[in-house]
Every structure is written in C-alpha cells, then in structure tokens.
Image: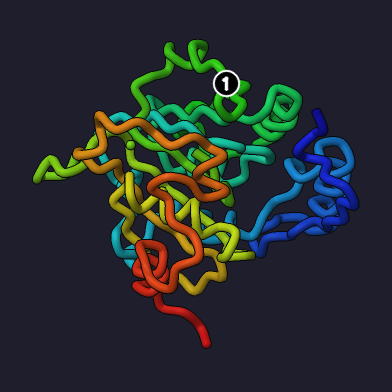
Amino acid sequence: MSDPNFPPNLDIQPLILTNAKDEEREQYRQKDAIATYGIAGRVWEATRPLLEYFTPSEQFEPPCSLLGTDETCRIIELGSGQSVASLHLAEYLKKNDLIITTDLPEVVPLCEKSIYSWNPPSSEHAQVVAQPLAWGGDQAHLAQYQPFTHILMCDLSSPLQSAENETFGPEVILSYTSRTLSLEESFFDSLALYFKTTPVRGGDWEAKVFICRRWKITEEWTLPDVKDVMNGGKGVIRGRSYGLVDDLFGSLEWDI
C-alpha cells in the first residue's frame, strides 16, 4: 500500500505563518519535515484561522468554548502533523487540561519533535501528548485519556450537549480550506446530516472554521462507510444543485 503522505509527483513548499519568530529557520525546518514526512510535514493554510480562533478575543461568533472556561478540557487532534494549532492552543489552557495530538504511527515522531521543541511563554499551559492513530484503526490505547470534550480537525475531510439536548458528544472544531468542492461535496453533505454545523464568523480567512456537534437523533444511526462519505453513497447525495452543503457554505460571507 502506498504512503498517503507521499502521493505521486508530490511538489509542495513550506507555508510560513505570519507569527513565525524566525522565518528562515522555520523555512528550513519545514522543508526538512516535508522531505521526511511528505504532506504531514507541511503546515497547511487551515492552521492560520485556528491560531486566531485559539487566541483570546471577542471578535468571533461563536466564541471559542475552550478559552475562559473553568471546566477541564480534554482535546484530541486528528492528523496533527506539525501540531502547530494544538501547541498554540495549549499556551492558553490550564495545567489540568490535556491535548492529545495524533497521526499515523510513522508521523508520530514529527508530533513528538514538535512538542519537544515547543517553547511556551509560561509554565501555565495544558499538557500535550502525542499518540498514534490511523483512520479506522484501533483506539483502545486512547481510553486512558477519555472522555474527550473537543475534537480538533485541521484541513481534514474524513470520518460529537446543547440546552435543548438536540446534540451530544464532544465539540468538533473543523478548519478547512476548500479546493475542489465537487469532490468534497459528499463529505460536507454527510457531515451536515450527522452534525449540527455552525460557521465561525469574525475572521478574514481563506479557510473556513466550523463548530460541529452530533445531532442527538443520529445516536443510533449506522455511520456511513468512509468510501461512501468521500465518493457518495446511500443517503449521501452527489451532483445536485442545492442541498445541505449548499446551505452550509451559503451561510458564510465570501470575498468576491
């Protein structure tokens, strides 16, 4: 089986975020990570809005539920790679909060390296631990960290209580850059069927950020197979003019 992080003709360059303290060093470090880990070694565009959303501010609606809360937060990030967003978030959380960064087993050393080289501004920050987790793989080793209150997904499209009890499970924070909507349509169609999805407003970003919670009514539903989510299948419609994904994207303010 081919390595998903090294597709044929891979040609990607580092993305230097505006908050990088040493751009030249970051450029070199990211080039080295790309050479070793492929796609997983690059920092992607959807990281940028999360860095802003995970910084205390009053400009976003809805505000980030992770900030300014007295409750203990237990967060898992899927496909962490460089773990930039998680490490930034950890700096604003409490000592008893926990972030689990995850990726394919062969990419976990990159996550661990990022944690090791992390230099938080103070000793008051969340604990960050890297663990292996492949899509659809065994999750038993994560039981010691559960229950999770939040799931973080940055630039991923792959297959969690409100006052009215219409939703349940952990909050999913999804930051995503649309590239080919016709190919991504099935994912967002399935997402909207299973999750109450609220766009975050207030940022001037190319990527879009969504707050997602699982609809209570779907608790006993059988989740669709990942191949159906990404390729269309029973209950997941493709090729129509209007639907859930159109409503979702239509509710956002787009730059023309």
Q: Residue at x 68, y 40 (%)?
A: 82
Tell me the kind of residue under disc 1.
Gly
Q: Left or right: where does residue 196 sit relative to residue 241?
A: left
As drawn, 168 above or below 190: above
> Residue 73: percent from the left, percent from the top?
35, 32
Q: Residue at x 83, y 58 (%)?
A: 13
Q: Which residue is mark 1?
A: 137
The foreground one among 51 and 197 is 197
Q: Left or right: where does residue 234 sit relative to residue 19?
A: left
Residue at the farthest front position: 234
Q: Left or right: where does residue 189 sit relative to residue 102?
A: left
As drawn, 77 above or below 201: above
Q: Quadrant of the N terminus?
A: top right
Residue 55 seen in render: no
As drawn, 234 above or below 124: below
Residue 101: quadrant of the picture:
top right
Q: Residue at x 49, y 34 (%)?
A: 225
> Residue 33: percent from the left, percent from the top?
82, 41
Q: Secondary structure at mark 1?
A: loop
The foreground one among 180 and 45 is 180
The mark total stands at: 1
Residue at the farthest bottom position: 256
Q: Residue at x 86, y 51 (%)?
A: 10
> Residue 32: percent from the left, percent from the top?
88, 42
Q: Left or right: where does residue 212 sit relative to residue 219?
A: right
> Residue 159: percent from the left, percent from the top?
49, 38
Residue 236 seen in render: yes
